[in-house]
Image (spheres, coloured by chain):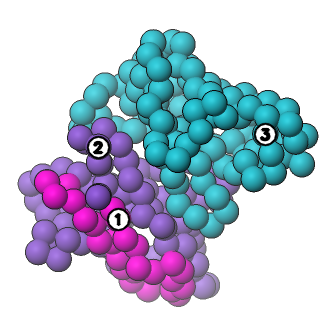
Chain colours: A cyan, B purple
Amino acid sequence: GAVVSQHPSWVICKSGTSVKIECRSLDFQATTMFWYRQFPKQSLMLMATSNEGSKATYEQGVEKDKFLINHASLTLSTLTVTSAHPEDSSFYICSARERPGPAAELFFGEGSRLTVL
Amino acid sequence: AQSVTQPDIHITVSEGASLELRCNYSYGATPYLFWYVQSPGQGLQLLLKYFSGDTLVQGIKGFEAEFKRSQSSFNLRKPSVHWSDAAEYFCAVLSGGYNKLIFGAGTRLAVHP
């Protein structure tokens, strides 16, 4: 199956710094990428939908200025957590699909664990 | 609003026993339903999906799920559980004009030897 890779898989940073997480589709061009956040022992909450070349669409309650999403190419989307604080510590997962529509399978990355000290 | 409910937060079964994980959805139109499995610290792997047609869907790793519109359910089953099946299982429905995946809270499966 298609592969979606996230980097880094884990990161520790100091409070107040910014952290960038990359999501790459390795063997297909992703028209749409999604960013999820997962707290320990909880479900995945959709943060935003990212289409190549356009602004991301954020879910209600997600701060656009804090979680910057860029989808600069058909194989790369980045999530930047700006001025990170301990409450931003979480598991961030991206997913990608090659084409729109319900029949297009979503492929998930391995996730990136962020710990803010 | 569309939603997915997984009533069981945690289930423990013995190896070799049968398994059923419950999932109920709330969706006005024809639902597109999925089951995913997540091992600790990992991303999600698709087990199976239902779009239309036969209401009994076969997936990978010996899993199957049955769509019951009258009960708004899409329960996941496996006749004989293996220790390697211990993981977190998520039911999901496509929402937002079939554009966004909405997940249930998940069911954590533990398998006793």
Q: Give the residues in magenta.
A: B3-31
Left or right relative to A92: residue A2: left
Q: Are tags 3 and 1 found on a single chain?
A: no
Tag 1 residue: B4
Residue beneath the point at 39% across and 30% down: A97
**Dot in front, 3 or 1:** 3
- On the question of residue A65 being in view, the answer is yes
**Which quadrant does the C terminus of chain B fall into?**
bottom right
Identify the secondary structure beneath mark 1. Answer: strand
Residue beneath the point at 39% across and 39% down: A106
| Residues at marks 1 and 2, CA–CA distance in whole angstroms | 14 Å
Q: Please rate how many residues cluster around mark 3, counting C-alpha atoms within 10 Å: few if below 14, some from 14 to 19, many from 20.
A: many
Residue toward you, B76 or B80: B76
Tag 3 residue: A84
Residue beneath the point at 76% across and 45% down: A114
Mark 2 near mark 3, Cβ–Cβ under 8 Å?
no
Q: Amino acid at mark 2?
A: Gly
Q: Chain under label 3? A: A
Q: Chain under label 1? A: B
| Residues at marks 3 and 1, CA–CA distance in whole angstroms | 31 Å
Q: Are tags 1 and 2 found on a single chain?
A: yes
